[in-house]
Image: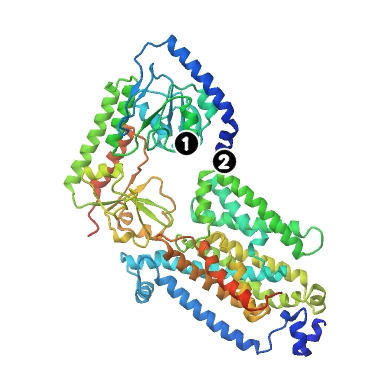
Amino acid sequence: MPTMRRRALLLSALAPLTLAACGSADGAATGEAAESATGTSFTYSPEGYDGLTVTLDKPAERIVADYYSAAALSAYGITPVAVFGYGHDGTPGQHVSADVEVLGQDDALSIEKLAAARPDVIIAYGNEDGTGWTWWDDKVIEQATAIAPFAPVKLGGTPEDMFARYRSVAEALGADTDAAEVTTQREGFDAARQKLRDVTAASPDITVLAAHFAADVIYTSGTLGVTAMLAEDGVTLVGPEAGADSAWAELSWETISDHPADVILVHDFSEAYEENPIYQSLPAVEAGQLGTWDDKRSYIYEDYTAWLTELAGVLEKAQDIVP
Amino acid sequence: MTALDRPGADEATEVHGPSAALTPARRSPTAVNVVLLVVLLALLLGACWASLTVGERPISLGTVLEALHARATGNPDHEVVWGARIPRTVGGLVVGSGIAVAGALIQAVSRNPLADPGILGVNAGAAFAVALSVAVLGASTMGAQLWAALIGAFAATAAVLAIGSLARSGIDPIRLTLAGVAFGAVMGGLTTALTLLDVDAFAAMRSWGAGSLSVRGLGGTLQALPFIAVGLLATLLCARSLDAVALGEDLAATLGVRVGRTRVIAVLGVTFACAAATAVAGPVGFVGLMVPHVIRFLVGPQQVWVLGLSVIGGPVLLLAADVVARIAVPGGMPVGVVTAFIGAPVLIALVRSKAVSTL
């Protein structure tokens, strides 16, 4: 597996070669576009990046995307030529075909492979200005965007916001965003949220703690996009208020009982908590009233539908066990 | 002057002689040592009290005692006492005594007053085994990591002993030290490589590798207890012989001490005690070096007293450091980060105020 050190080494060693490669890749791409410009040209003005518009004078056919964007676009039948980024071992990786070329995993990226993939556009979670992927430093941004323009997707907001953003990306890429298959999936998601709203309306006293457990500390949040959606749908979230600079609040194992909850949602990335006697003594754990959550799931309607349906089931069966 | 002159030697020769540190001070050593024993026991009680009552959730000693004899399920204070405070305190007692005794033994057997139990490659071997078990076998439970650390520690010591005692019959302290340092460097490199290649191993080493008493329940500590007990038993067996070995191999032999056997027992004691302590808490630095060193400053070089008082001094330092660690930042920090901050000033003060303690 590539590592940070290897990446740094690779980047510094290959920088001169890569710049040369970019030139030729660009030339080849332009040549092809001139021959086969049949569709409409690519124009994309991402929501959340005011004034930014990414345009190509031809359709974007060869797409390089991060795993999350590749997964989200798969619902629209869009397959990238290559992927990079985090998520190969999580939910996003499950929606990316094994045939798709991998340019690097986690924070690693082979600029040489990126150039060889001859992308028309790079689509990924954007940094603050939308100039590059959220984890790239200035040097990588410069090298990568010399190969192909970068089309950012703003990360943040509720899952609904994220689904809308990927829908607009799919539209810019020329996909039929009202195709029967994706419409069915969208309706399934809406129905699952309605089911959750019905359940929470029927038992408004059930309190829920969305927690990410670790050996020494517990992170909770009621303001991340995914928990904000739950709150919108009537879930009564408990837990400490997050500070101004983060959506996450921290609490310790010693103080978790100050935030009693009938149901605990265990974050998928929790670790080293199951053997903790304090965890085992929590009322929700003793009663088996447990669900899951993950703020980093890829934006796939079917995945969210499955999770919301499971969550509605947990809440429907939950007893009001804490005062 | 030979050591045999000393019982009748006058004050001048005792102060200026090269082996002055081998003799107890003029004042009655036992009285001073007994006072120190009482002081250390009082400090240990204080450390246990602090460890049980201090934390993010304020819990009074009364509540702790109530939780101990009449545990009420569902009472958050009682759950914290049983779920966090008692495991940490027992962990501190067991780990602290194990590391300090291992340190005292290794300093005696290597005749190096600055030796650390890690010198035999125990820490490096345990760390590598934990990283390997996580990366290759996906070991995630504390029990699995504990056994991996134990096996790694024993394998490392066996390898160091094999390398260090090839040339001569018996154990040569200098060869042993060199072999341990070299072996530790190789293992450290391999562990770093593993953690760079495997995300899970990196995460495991980040929490385990810093040295922490935030043990998940009492289970791990209780599993490690028999090994620490073996280490303490070895201490009892060889304490007096080590005094003679400190006089030099030839002299010890003339006094009827079997030098090779004493060293083997001592090294086994170091391995058992240090391996078990490291398996529970990760490589906690500085306690094994500092506690026996400071105690030798105070009581002189008699191994019975150095070893015995280290058993008490280790937990005092470790528990005090852990209390500081848990209130220093919200959520606590690994105790290994704090031990040096607390221990180093004491050591520096002693180094500046008295003659350096030697063996």
Total count of labels: 2
x, y percentage for residue A22?
52, 23
x, y percentage for residue A64?
44, 26
Q: Give the residue type that dot 1 points to.
A: Asp
- In percent of the image, x 53 and y 57: which residue is there? B210
Outermost residue on the top side: it is A35
Answer above or below: position of A202 versus A103: below
**Which element is circle 2 on?**
helix
Q: Residues within 10 Å of mark 2 (few under 14, many from 20)?
A: few
Q: Quadrant of residue A48?
A: top left
Q: Quadrant of residue A123?
A: top left
Frontmost residue, B148 versus B174: B174
The quadrant the N terminus of chain B occupies is bottom right
x, y percentage for residue B164?
75, 59
Q: Nearer the viewer, mark 2 or mark 1?
A: 1
- Residue linked to disc 1: A138
- Residue linked to disc 2: A5
Answer above or below: position of B191 versus B296: above
- In percent of the image, x 51 and y 44: which residue is there? B199
Q: Tell me the distance, in whole angstroms, between the alpha carbons under discs 2 and 1.
A: 17 Å
Q: Is residue A1 visible?
A: no
**Which element is circle 1 on?**
helix
Please report whichever mark, 2 or 1, sits nearer to the chain's N-terminal start: 2
Q: Give the residue type that dot 2 points to.
A: Arg
